[in-house]
Amino acid sequence: PEPAGPLPIRKLQESLINKIAAGEVIQRPASALKELIENCLDAGATSIRVVAKEGGLKLLQIQDNGSGIRKADLPILAERFTTSKISTFSDLSKISTYGFRGEALASISHVSHLTVLTKTASEPCAWKAHYSDGTLSPSKPGLSAEPKPSAGNDGTVITIEDLFYNTPTRLSALKSSSDEYARILDVVTKYAIHNPTVAFSCKKIGSSGSEVSTPGNSRVPDAIRLLFGSTIAKELLTSKASSNAGSLSQPDTSDSQDSEAWSAEAHFTSPNHQAKKTTFLLFINHRLVESPRIKKSIESIYSAILPKGSYPFVYLSIQIDPRSIDVNVHPTKQTVHFLNEDVITEQIADSIQGTLNGRSASDKGNQAG
Ligand code: ADP
Ligand code: MG
């Protein structure tokens, strides 16, 4: 057949553009939850409670005791690219909050029914607002879309109902409620371990017990014990590495703004613990991220000391000067790039190996036996 001529190029409709963008940020209930937990932490919450129904597809609710949202901001809250966290391009290079693009709530409002109940400490009552397609919308047709005064505590309750109700392809691609709930638990568990001073809970709606519950006044190894069990906790070793130690000597510049400074803390199991697969929790500047490269370099240490088919538990938290890290690589912010990635990875791996070999004098406390 004869090749057809090119089709005309047209501008996509705004609503379609927003739905496409939403699909990139919000892939499943757990990715919505990750964004919401990060918002709670950005708002200074010390308590974060998650409730889910049907794996978060029917309902996903998250309550925090953070700063709350000013009533005046509610009209633009779910618009795309509205944020309280950055205002200039240069802010992008020193981000200390999780959020910065103002895309999460907007995206969620395009693919679900979104309700926000929020109260700041200075407001006399809480305000409740419903959102659809980026803007305030009435809870029922015919009613006003204006936020309504409501009873509520200081902080924010975000409720997402009927996720992906208007994107059936996405909905049918998700496996099952129980699989989605497992992913929700995974996200809550990891953030609870990294934020042991914040009390987390997660449960199914109507259930009396929680699958995750942390007290909020502990430390990382305690949280690991609570959430991953004592068989892992009792084999935990600890090591620390930083730009000031080891072979990479950092000249102490008079300018204390050393943009290459970094530090890392790891909690990992001794060779006595042998699991069927690696559990790897990686946080870079407090962000839960994935790095096949770092994972591989740690796994290769263990492959030399564990029997074939056995794997470790590893928690690793790296802090890097925000100026040497690019978090704006991926819509879900799951991938980050940073300067000197190879050198830093190698030094962290060396420090873990040193502790595992029981010969590192500078590592804190535990020694492999
Ligand atoms: P971003 O986090 O990138 O700014 P979001 O869409 O996640 O974008 O949130 C938009 C804005 O809504 C935030 O900048 C913040 O001001 C406010 N916000 C969202 N969630 C909360 C919360 N739980 N507590 C207080 N403020 C919140
Ligand atoms: Mg956010």
Image (cartoon, rainbow, N blue to C red):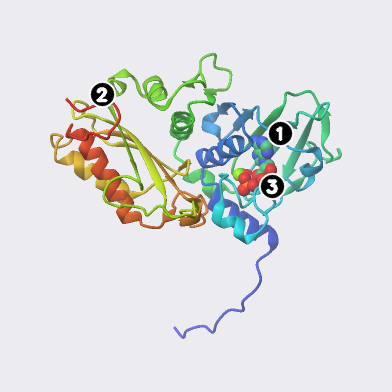
Residue annotated with mark 2: 235
Figure quadrant, ligand 1? top right
Asked if the residue under mark 2 is in contact with the one under mark 1, i.e. CB atoms within 8 Å, the reply is no
Please give the label number shown on residue 83. none
State whether residue 235 is above or below residue 349: above
Label 3 SS: loop
Q: CA distance from mark 3 to mark 2?
A: 43 Å
Residue annotated with mark 1: 68
Q: Residue furthest top?
A: 208
Label located before the other in sequence (3 or 2): 3
Mark 1 Cα shell of 10 Å, populated few (<14), some (14-19), many (≥20):
many
Query: Residue placed at 78% from the left, 36% from the top?
Result: 139
Q: Is mark 3 within 8 Å of ligand 1?
A: yes
Q: CA distance from mark 1 to mark 2?
A: 41 Å
Label located before the other in sequence (1 or 3): 1
- Residue 123 as seen in the image, left or right of residue 28: right
Label 1 SS: loop
Percent position of residue 355, x then y: 23, 34
Hey, which quadrant is residue 288 in on the image?
top left
259, 99: nearer the viewer? 259
* Amino acid identity at mark 1: Gly
Q: Is mark 1 within 8 Å of ligand 1?
A: yes
Quarter containing the C terminus: top left
* Amino acid identity at mark 3: Ser
Residue annotated with mark 3: 84
93, 228: nearer the viewer? 93
Mark 2 Cα shell of 10 Å, populated few (<14), some (14-19), many (≥20):
some
Query: Residue placed at 22% from the left, 29% from the top?
Result: 270
Q: Is residue 111 visible?
A: no
